[in-house]
Amino acid sequence: MRGLLLAIAAGETAETPLAYDALREAVARNGRLFNDFTHEAPIYGASWNGAESEILTWSDDGTARLWDAATGAEQQRFTHESRVSGTSWNGAESQILTWDGGRTVRLWDAATGAERLRFTHEDSVGSASWNEAASEILTWSRDNTARL
């Protein structure tokens, strides 16, 4: 149910407002908690942590945000100069990678929101991923490079 609500909240189809309202009413009738996770621009994606207690969203507003799933409270904000194109948790969920629509990848401490590392490519970053031990990060870009 939570995944469906997030998908509908992030959607941009003509049917979204009606479906969103209908689901909100159904949740309210069943006494279940419903939270909004709002950015100032379109949201590109959302993901749960393993315990389903936190939600990570990323947006065209240049931020990725970490939310408390139960209360809807924003816990951390990770800011870029341009739209955030993607995010990735490390295995322990103590660090978060974000990459933007430009050339920048950033590593953040999930608990404090502190930026730990920043690196760039010469062109747009396609994505980033962790190795199994979460000790290395692989990025790739339109600049014809993948970097470890």
Image (spheres, helix red, strand yellow):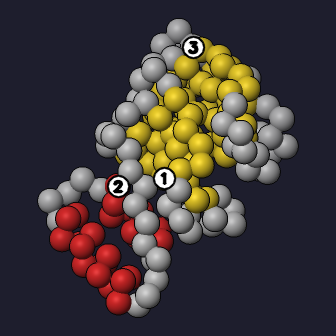
Image position of 34 with respect to 100: above or below = below
Q: Dot 2: few (<14), some (14–19), or many (≥20) neighbours within 10 Å?
A: some
Q: Give the labeled residue for mark 2.
A: 10
Residue 3, can we see it?
yes
Cα separation, mark 1 vs mark 2, equals 8 Å
Q: Considering the numbered disc 1 on the image, is that residue within a helix, a strand or a loop?
A: strand
Q: Earlier in the sequence, mark 1 or mark 2?
A: 2
Q: Residue furthest left?
A: 14
Q: Residue furthest top?
A: 122
Are the residues at dot 1 and dot 2 in contact (C-beta closer than 8 Å)? yes
Q: Considering the numbered disc 2 on the image, is that residue within a helix, a strand or a loop?
A: helix
Q: Amino acid at mark 1?
A: Ala
Are the residues at dot 1 and dot 3 in contact (C-beta closer than 8 Å)? no
Measured from the top left, where is residue 100 in percent x and y? 48, 27
Q: Amino acid at mark 3?
A: His
Q: Nearer the viewer, residue 45 or 31?
A: 31
Measured from the top left, where is residue 136 in percent x and y? 79, 31
Q: Give the labeled residue for mark 3.
A: 121
Cα separation, mark 1 vs mark 3, equals 24 Å
Question: Horizontally, is 91 left or right of 82 in the view?
Answer: right
Dividing the picture into quadrants, the one containing residue 130 is top right
Q: Earlier in the sequence, mark 1 or mark 3?
A: 1
Q: Give the labeled residue for mark 1.
A: 46
Residue that appears at 49% across and 48% down: 57
Q: Nearer the viewer, residue 66 or 98?
A: 66
Q: Considering the numbered disc 3 on the image, is that residue within a helix, a strand or a loop?
A: loop
Q: Dot 3: few (<14), some (14–19), or many (≥20) neighbours within 10 Å?
A: some
Image position of 130 with respect to 74: above or below = above
Give the quadrant of the C terminus.
Answer: top right
Q: Earlier in the sequence, mark 3 or mark 2?
A: 2
Residue that appears at 71% across and 22% down: 117
